[in-house]
Amino acid sequence: MMNPVSEPIVKDLVLVGGGHSHAIALRMLGMQPLSGVRITLLTEASDTPYSGMLPGHIAGFYSHDECHIDLRPLAQFAQAQLYLDRVVGLDLANKRVICAHRPPVAFDVVSIDIGSTPTIPDIARAVESSIPVKPIRRFLDHWDQLIEQVAENPEKPICIGIIGGGAGGVELSLAVQRHLHKVLRRSQQPPTNLSLHLFQRGTVLMPGYSRWVGDHFHKILAHRGIHLHLGETVTEVQAHQVKCELGLTVACDHTFWVTQAAAPNWIKASGLATDAQGFIGVDENLRSLSHPFVFAAGDIATIKNHPRPKAGVFAVRQGKPLFENLRRTLSGQQLKPYIPQKRYLSLIGTSEDSDSNQHNAAIASWGPFGWQSSTLWQLKDGIDRRFMDRFSQLPEMMHQPTSTLAAQLQPQPQSQIQNLMRCGGCGAKVGSSVLERVLQRIQQEYPQPSDRADILIGLDAPDDAAVLQIPADRVLVQTIDYFRSLINDPFVFGQISANHCLSDIFAMGAMPQSALAIATVPYALEAKVEETLYQLLAGALKVLHQAGAALIGGHTTEGAELAFGLTCNGLAERDRLLRKTGMHPGQVLILTKALGTGALFAADMQRRAKGRWIDAAVESMLQSNQAAAECLMQHQASACTDITGFGLLGHLAEMTQASQVAVELKLAAIPLLAGARTVVEQGIVSSLQPQNLRAALKVQNWSEISDRPESALLFDPQTSGGLLAAVPAERASDCVSALQSLGYQQSRAIGGIFPCTSSPEPITIEL
């Protein structure tokens, strides 16, 4: 959820990428927060892999969670916004980060830590079976699929090619072999069903290391039956074969690239100073050579006077100096130089082909020296686990801000800094100039629907109020909702809020027409208020326009927390309205979305929810109920409601009372969001749960199922939850299939409707 603002926001720090340096900097920002600085982490995924443990993960020694830093709780600890998107450019003149799927993100200071990608010939990019190891997420998805394929058909021979004989390629070869051999052994198949080929352009392995290390790994690979092709330059990768410059052709079912690192094209295109390979050139302060408000660390950066290999050890060690210099530049202090060490210890796992992690070994490399032992693996394993513990075991209490940025930035031309006595009433409104600029941007980038002749006065010609035309053959359906933000991303929150508010319109069988917005924006300088309001309204308008509705006005105010809501208007035919009174015996109840948002976000507030659980919950909340409502009506639904604050049982109890029927629910059929059951088993529920639990009085056999963890989720308040509808029994199966084909994958038939009995408890729940 959004963090309350006690002081105005005066500076925006945007961290692009969730690499090692940024993870460390975020942890330190949580320990030593800067008042007045709004931090935004902009990254493609909510977790980031730790490079030191990735080979062990591929080999099967570590689980996904053990080797990935969960960025959601880390960002929350640092009181940072988390935006999930792919960066495609920088507008340095206007200080904005350009994203693939959201509005640009404004900054005062930006730091970039996005790693690197392998240099891959264009001819291999179109081949589905040719996978670069970076970005690692795509590779891991492919790797998981490959493991599953081998497990399903272990008797089928498989050949894998790995291109690149540096440390990464060598480690990957050993790790891949170790894991797939284990899969084959489990299926009682011979290891010879797997063949591995390692292609290296040079004549030696691991040219960046000492000769002893390269020769030693050469012996290990040869001993384990991995085919080495040294001095072979790959020139073509086809669907099932690899071709080399000297004529060598090897049949390969899958090909992985672990070649020289490269930078994305948008870095150089943005105008940043780069080195010859396109990496961001920085000075000893980790600051851009061309733009002093840009910092960079990790693989994406090259320190001009101290170039080093692209290795995770440097990214880790740059975390602390990066934090220090970001803090100093934001407060106007002199920066502190960082000089990377020339020599560093490398510990490289050998992925021993055994079922035990304890029998693994590692090779240490220090300059010209190298040696191997199982003790070195235990040392590496301990170092890596302690590093990861820093992010999974975050302190419960944070220090008070060590500096107040608003006080350091005097004199300020804008009086918003003086927030000790914020006005109430209309004095709390967002200024007209801010609102005017936001609306101009919104109307340019999100033009209103052109076919709404029934909106006589709206935002295109603002007046004291909007004026709507209601067709004679329609009725007006109106609803309102408003709540605090549950996520640190105003663009996503705007979408979730709009979906939530529109759901009542869809549940009634109406089509959206228009909406009035009400927004509370955290205290900040004028430009910061404008940016937040723009992101918020952009998200809401994205959803409104997809639904065919127009934004016709609203009200904005400042406050301690971001909050948003809409008054939504819809039009419907009177005799086609869906109401809670329309359930009939013999019908089937269908639920279109899984339950659990309330419990998951309660856990998120406590930093006890995994990032991927929240990702899945957000994905569910971003899904509109419009297509589901249309599908339900096509399958003759006669009653419908949306599942929101009162939880499934609370809203179902309203329907049974209104329709005078009884219901039998199947507990096992009710879909749950990933992680929801886990958090309620830990005793984590929404703060509204105790009030919603009163609906248990409507359940005949509550005592029989009350001790089951999933029963608590029947009362879980949902934000932008699914629809609950009654359809004829003969249409139920087709309806569920149709819903799932429309993208509502969690749609389920969850119970039946029966004649009302004399019992005051109309609901029965079957296990």
Image: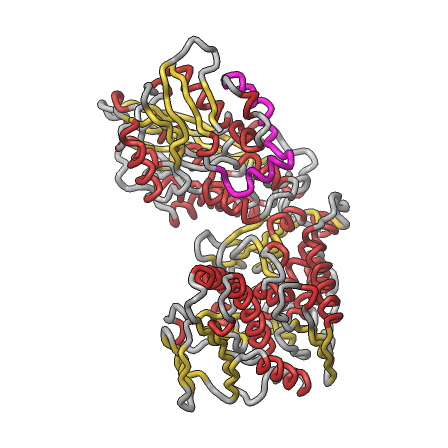
Q: What residue appears at the point 55 percent right and 80 percent down from the top-left corner?
A: 165
Q: Is residue 544 above or below residue 293?
A: above
Would residue 742 appear left or right of 158 to someone viewing this image? Answer: left
Q: Nearer the viewer, residue 342 or 38?
A: 342
Q: Position of residue 99 (x, y in %)?
A: 47, 57
Q: Quadrant of the N terminus?
A: top right
Q: What residue appears at the point 70 percent right and 59 percent down from the top-left corner?
A: 385
Segment tinted magenta in the rendering: 672-699
Magenta stretch contains residue 389: no
Q: Position of residue 549 (x, y in %)?
A: 34, 37
Magenta stretch contains residue 680: yes
Would residue 660 appear left or right of 633 to someone viewing this image? Answer: right
Q: Nearer the viewer, residue 242 or 3?
A: 242
Q: Nearer the viewer, residue 652 or 290?
A: 652
Q: Is residue 41 above or below residue 477?
A: below
Q: Is residue 630 above or below residue 195?
A: above
Seen as rendered, the residue at the extreme front is 188
Seen as rendered, the residue at the extreme top is 758
Q: Position of residue 479 (x, y in %)?
A: 41, 26
Q: Nearer the viewer, residue 727 or 605?
A: 727
Q: Position of residue 79 (x, y in %)?
A: 65, 46
Residue 497 visible in this rendered orientation of the protein? no
Residue 693 visible in this rendered orientation of the protein? yes
